Amino acid sequence: DTTVKQNPRYKLARVGKPVNLICSQTMNHDTMYWYQKKPNQAPKLLLFYYDKILNREADTFEKFQSSRPNNSFCSLYIGSAGLEYSAMYLCASTLGQAYSNERLFFGHGTKLSVL
Amino acid sequence: GQQVQQSPASLVLQEGENAELQCNFSSTATQLQWFYQSPGGSLVSLLSNPSGTKHTGRLTSTTVTKERRSSLHISSSQTTDSGTYLCADSGYNKLTFGKGTVLLVSP
């Protein structure tokens, strides 16, 4: 199975409430990423795990948390959702270290709407 | 950090016409990649082409590293080619995407 699965496909959240998005892959990939995509904008890297090591982007460091309890699963956690979090969240994975020449596999994404 | 510009923002073609998509980046690309997203689908890697010319099926990518640009040529476009095409580069150890080109191929 060469797919990256994301759940749910659509998520409604209230302002101030937590949000937890799930991603999984069974390709035994070393690195898993989370991107945020807003309309008419490029996908923006939020963070990635290489094995058990989490790397978060400096400008989104405090806004997103993540966990990777095993090789297959990776979550994206928002402690208190704001309107600006409304976006498509894309999970991706790759074999080897981040930004190697290995192919990147993306999930379908979770569309988060914060009301 | 790396910045990636794509043009055109959108492109409308008749089936059978060729498409030429452009990607320009601010710093020398090290792992230039092209991705495709069908309407409602996930992003799929098309090819990686940090330099030179690479062919796969009806796709041809040409990257001129010293001029910091890459192109994706789609020959004999089909309606199923419709979707969004993104280029990305992992210069500075960070995969940076462009905004994409939305391609619509009409029958």
Image: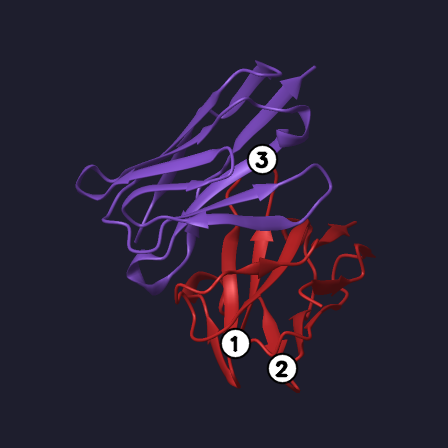
Chain coloured purple: B
Is the same chain shared between marks 2 and 3? no
> What's the distance in space between the residues labelled 2 and 1, CA to CA?
8 Å
Q: Label 3 belongs to which residue?
A: B84
Query: As displayed, is residue A78 above or below residue B3?
Result: below
Q: Where is residue B44 drawn, in percent x and y?
A: 59, 50
Q: CA distance from mark 2 to mark 3?
A: 30 Å
Which quadrant, please, contains the N terminus of chain B?
Answer: bottom left
SS for callout 2: loop
| Chain where mark 1 sits | A
Residue A68 found in image quarter: bottom right
Tag 3, which secondary structure? strand
Q: Which chain is red?
A: A
- At horizontal 50% and vertical 53% (from top left) the residue drawn is A44
Query: Looking at the image, which is closer to me, B46 or A22?
Result: B46
Residue B57 visible in the current orientation: yes
Closer to the observer: label 2 or label 3?
A: 3
Q: Which mark is residue A68?
A: 2
The residue at the point 38 percent across, 38 percent down is: B61
Labelled pair 2, 1 in contact (Cβ < 8 Å): yes
Q: Are marks 3 and 1 in contact (CB under 8 Å)?
A: no
Comparing B80 with B43, the one in front is B80
Q: Nearer the viewer, residue B69 or A83?
A: B69
> Where in the figure is residue A26, as x and y percent of width and height?
68, 75
Tell me, yes or no, whether dots 3 and 1 are on the same chain. Answer: no
Amino acid type, residue under disc 3 in the picture: Thr
Instruction: Give the letter of the chain under mark 3.
Output: B
- A97 versus B85 height, above or below: below
User: Would you name the residue on which mark 1 appears?
Assistant: A49
- The amino acid sitting under disc 2 is Arg
- Circle 3 residues within 10 Å: few <14, some 14–19, many ≥20: some
| Residue B68 place in picture, x, y as percent | 24, 40
